[in-house]
Image (cartoon, rainbow, N blue to C red):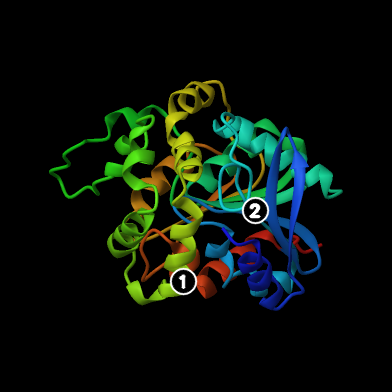
Amino acid sequence: MDLKDDAVLAAELPGDFRSAFAEVNGTTLHYVAGGEGEPLVLLPGWPVTWREFRHLMPRLAQRFRVIAVDLRGMGLSAKPESGYDKKTMAEDIYELARHLGYSKVSIAGHDIGSMVAFSYAVNHPEAIAKVAMMEVGHPDASLYGLKLLPSDGAPNLWWFALNQLRGLPEQLLTGRMRYVVDYVFEAHLVDRSKVGEADRQAYARAYETADAIRAGDGWFQTFDQDVADFKTYGKVSVPMLGLASPNNFAAMQGVWTQQGDDVRVAMIDACGHFLPIEQPEAVARELIDFFSPDPG
């Protein structure tokens, strides 16, 4: 993947954003930072990169120091052989925050990034002010109830099964991830025009090498460990916001309200899974309202 692509895109965003790298927790993380104020870390999911937040970032940068991170194995970040359990990935973000000089940050995550955000909140409560989660929660035992052949209108999450396999996805998809990217967006956007050709190409390039496929699959292959870790966790003690699409709102409201001491859940209308892409203004409003310092 061409470094210039991300660096140029970052520099073009209002808010004086810059692309950078940090050596933390035995790996290398790529991140894009800009804006001024209290630190707000953004964690993306599969099969996207930090770019999924780019329409949010200029709005958030007016109030916060925004740090959008490519997770371990994603985009321009390194793709080590191990460390894809969400506890280790949360440690990556904890050490990145310390590397950047912050003893406490707020975090908003989407998809896989939401799982990492939850893990950060329960494993490093002293180092997080507030946490927001979008569309999914931390892996728990409910994953074992997912149906391979859903017959009740539930979504077909076929990639959960494919990404569990070792070696085969690389053989099938190296150089062909554009097919997966297109399928996921076609199936999970209300307005498919919100992800244009340039973005689709960028996401496909980010995931189409054998190493990138292996690394992304690692997020799914560690679900057993994530579920085991979840069983040891208590509730999130800091304020927690959950944002969900209309199709997912009821289910996630039931989950999130049981997982924190101070939880608010809001629906983002007229969108599918990719809230930050389809409804950046609505998501930005919710995040600004939630993460802004309490009056007084």
Instruction: Determine if residue 103 is in view.
Output: no
> What SS does tag 1 mark?
loop
Q: Position of residue 79 (x, y in %)?
A: 58, 40
Instruction: Determine the residue located farthest toward the right in the rendered image.
Output: 101
Relative depth, front residue between 56 and 78? 78
Mark 1 or mark 2, which is nearer to you?
A: 2
Tell whether 186 sits left or right of 150: right
Tell whether 78 sits left or right of 274: right
Q: Residues within 10 Å of mark 2 (few under 14, many from 20)?
A: many
Query: What type is the residue that disc 2 sits on?
Result: Val
Residue at x-position 22% and y-position 47%: 154
Please say if 291 is above or below 222.
below
Residue at x-position 69% and y-position 34%: 91
* Tally of numbered tags: 2
- Give the Cα separation between the discs numbered 1 and 2: 20 Å
Residue at x-position 61% and y-position 63%: 287
Query: What type is the residue that disc 1 sits on?
Result: Gln
Screen quadrant of the C terminus: bottom right
Instruction: Determine the residue located farthest toward the left in the rendered image.
Output: 151
Earlier-in-chain disc, 1 versus 2: 2
Q: Which mark is residue 69?
A: 2
Tell whether 65 sits left or right of 151: right
- Residue identified by numbered label 1: 279
Say which quarter of the image contains residue 126: top right
Q: Position of residue 224 (x, y in %)?
A: 43, 24
Marks 1/2 in contact by CB < 8 Å: the verdict is no
Q: Position of residue 180 (x, y in %)?
A: 33, 54
Please say if 6 is above or below 172.
below
Q: Residues within 10 Å of mark 1 (few under 14, many from 20)?
A: some
Say which quarter of the image contains residue 31: bottom right
Say which quarter of the image contains residue 151: top left
Q: Position of residue 231 (x, y in %)?
A: 50, 22
